[in-house]
Image: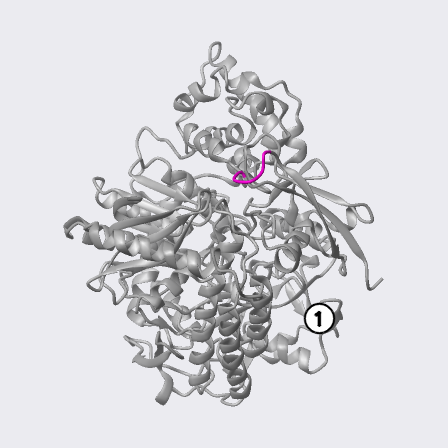
Amino acid sequence: MDQESYDVLIVGGGLAGIRAAIAAAEMNPRLKIGMVSKVYPMRSHTVSAEGGAAAVMSAEDSYHTHAFDTIKGSDYLADQDVVEAFVRESPVEIVQMEHWGCPWSRNPDGTIAVRPFGGMTTWRTVFAADKSGFHMLHTVFQTSLKYDQIHRHDEAFVTKLLVEDSRCVGVVAMDMRSGRFIALTAKSVILATGGFGRIYAFTTNGNICTGDGMALAYRAGVPLKDMEMVQFHPTGLPFTGILITEAVRGEGGYLLNKDGERFLKRYVPNKMELGPRDIISRAMITEFDAGRGFEGPHGLYMHLDVRHLGEAVIDRKLPFMRELGREFVGIDIVKDPIPVRPVMHYMMGGVDADISGLTPMIGLYAAGECANVGLNGANRLGSNSLPECLVFGAAAGRAAADYASSAKAVGSNPVDAMLKAEAKRVDETYLSKRDGDERIGEIREDMQLSMDEGAGVFRTREGLLELTKRLDSFRERFEKVKLYDSSRTFNTELTSAFELDFMLDCAVTVAHSALAREESRGAHARRDFPDRNDEKFLKHTLAHATDGAPRLDYRDVRITSFQPQARSY
Amino acid sequence: MPDKKITVRATRFDPDKDEKPRLQSYEIPFPDESMVVLDALNYIKSHVDGSLSYRWSCRMGICGSCGMMVDGVPKLTCNAFLRDYWPKAVTVEPLNNFPIIRDLVTDLDDFMHKLKSIKPWIIRKQELPLGAGEHRQTNEQIDDFRQFSQCINCMLCYAACPVYGLDDKFLGPAATALARRYNLDSRDQGLKQRLPMVADPDGVWECSFVGECSVVCPKGVDPAKAIQQTKLDTTMRFVLPYGNRE
């Protein structure tokens, strides 16, 4: 039988996954650790993060302010004990990354430099020019190569969690090169598969961000938490959705409407360009609606202007932005303003997990964007996600290693049957199916456009109801899908089918969770319920899989010392 | 021109069915000047032929997945604009010098082994405890290795390298540049451990200094320079003391 056994298995090879693998290896060097990813790890979407990683790095800053900024930024939906633990661990992880070789930008005295970022009251964002995610990912990946006990399965697509007696005991994966199905069993499993930007049409996210881990957990009975909380970044390039980092504003860039006005004075007068992402994105849409946006071939946009910073600052702090402008838009940001508009960027919601990454299922952990440990609430602050991957990746790695060190081994009899059943399901559903006339790519495009329309920056009851109906129809169409590729070798139409199947599940949880939250909080802005309602909704939404629409229930937010206040900047 | 079209010729190869790769032509709409070769491939896959296989992800030139030969030149297809080829047809093939797995997908296991072999991590005689904080390093010290740290492992340099094309034992451009990246890092003391790999007969000495690697690099890395510097290093070691950085 095709089976590999591990103590700890990590699904996903981005920043959170690799950090978890190294933490598990360091915690107990005798453990055999597996890491399975549908791409080579250095292709993971961490690579696209630009601005930096927030951490309290100096005596002038304090854990208390980082915690308060994060909780206020979350519109009080963050679990405060989780935030307090996070802000203490983040600086330790930043130094750890430095010891592993991350080329953090420096102060003249050689210490690690920080830059301002949106929603943060002081300078605390550590950065590696404007390619922070790229450098962090390559640093942890290259460092991970020195641990011989970490065994990788690159380009293997996980289609199912193996569950035995309510305990997660591994996964079924398809080796993409051979098309062969393998069972990867483990005493503990960590999901670190990232977000699902690709359920939207206009997104900063790469093609691989399809919510695989969220859907895997959801189908196995683990709830998805706060799925209505989708972040729209204010500054994406029209057409491609390429991210223009918030650091552009951190370094002093202006957002201008078509009248040349710094319009944020009407929305976040005390913070201006350094306001939080949810509010600035709404301000931009409001300005567009008032006729104050520029009109371009790819829709309305604003100007992001850094010309006053000068070439020297741009080349030292924002060289990648200059490169992106030159290569993808044909402009030189030293001389030309950058066209930008709000773009789907990040998922606050995710697999329900506690502070150690443990999900409600024994043996199953989650970390990074695919998890919701309660850090980001209704709106994540820029530069909190890279340290989230480090802090909670490491925590999940340690907790999973600890559990694996004492848990009993996984048997092979039921696993064998589950593997065969899964291979058979895939064959019957896709490869040997002869009927059907729907194309993967066309259903996917319809889903993406419907999500942009129905679950964007502003939502309404009518729009969300229409969205849930459309998503049902896309699911029906998906049952009639036809594959044009029957090959076993690197069949990317088959993996696209797996991804669309997963994305449809995730999209449904977004739509239903958003429909039920009849208030506006953080990134979830209802035109029909414009105010926050703490009495009813100071709660996490939990979406559970059923045969039909998800079943929703709610859990109180944990509050320690920061009582909810009105959120203004 | 509402009905502007472009012809894309793409390599097709399925090892289960085909003896050798062949080109297949697709004529697709070209409605927007912003379209890149990758957009054309995605259009084909979504609307014309779902069986065409290729890798891609970030479509912003940083993940390194989508390198292919475009009209014979190794390029990231996410920033190879169709307008630069139109009205002629554009030919898209898998990267040269790598075994083909399927269609436009190549096998890069060889590089993954080479990457590990050069020990791409910080090596120190004694590790600094975490509690001691960061190593001091100035931006000027980072400038010493900065360009070599920009490698996205896209493999365009290997596809352009005539020496690697003849002998895949050659360590090659990206792996040498990354070894250089660590050897030049003021925090690193691993030069001596990496030297056997880079100074091996299959290491830098194989390079005939064609320099194509540096020409095709989409990230401004200069692997040819890394190779020449490494040659100098391996020679000078025998005549000059190298301080304590080993």
**Residue in the picture at 61% in, 38% down:** B94
Q: Is residue B30 in view from this perspective? A: yes
* Residue to which mark 1 is pinned: A299
Q: Position of residue A36 (x, y in %)?
A: 37, 48
Residue in the foreground of this view, choosing between A524 and A365: A365
Taking depth in this image into account, of A104 and A413 the one nearest to the observer is: A413
Give, as a three-letter code, the residue at label 1: Gly
The answer to whether residue A395 shows anywhere in this view is: no
Q: What residue lies at 23% left-to-right and 50% top-to-bottom? A: A401
Mark 1 secondary-structure assignment: strand
Magenta span contains residue B18: yes
Vertical comparison of B18 with A374: above or below: above
Q: Main secondary structure of the magenta part?
A: loop
Front residue of B161 and B189: B161
Q: Which is more toward the observer, A75 or A543? A: A543
- Residue A440 in percent (x, y) is at 56, 62
- Based on the picture, tell me whether residue B149 belongs to the magenta stretch: no
Span colored in magenta: B15-19
Packing grade of label 1 (10 A; few <14, some 14-19, many >=20) is few
Q: Residue at x 47, y 10 (%)?
A: B238
Residue B118 percent coordinates (x, y) = 44, 28
Q: Residue A412 location in percent, x, y?
A: 21, 49
For the point 42% across and 73% down, which residue is it?
A227
**Quick one: quadrant of the N terminus of chain A?**
top left
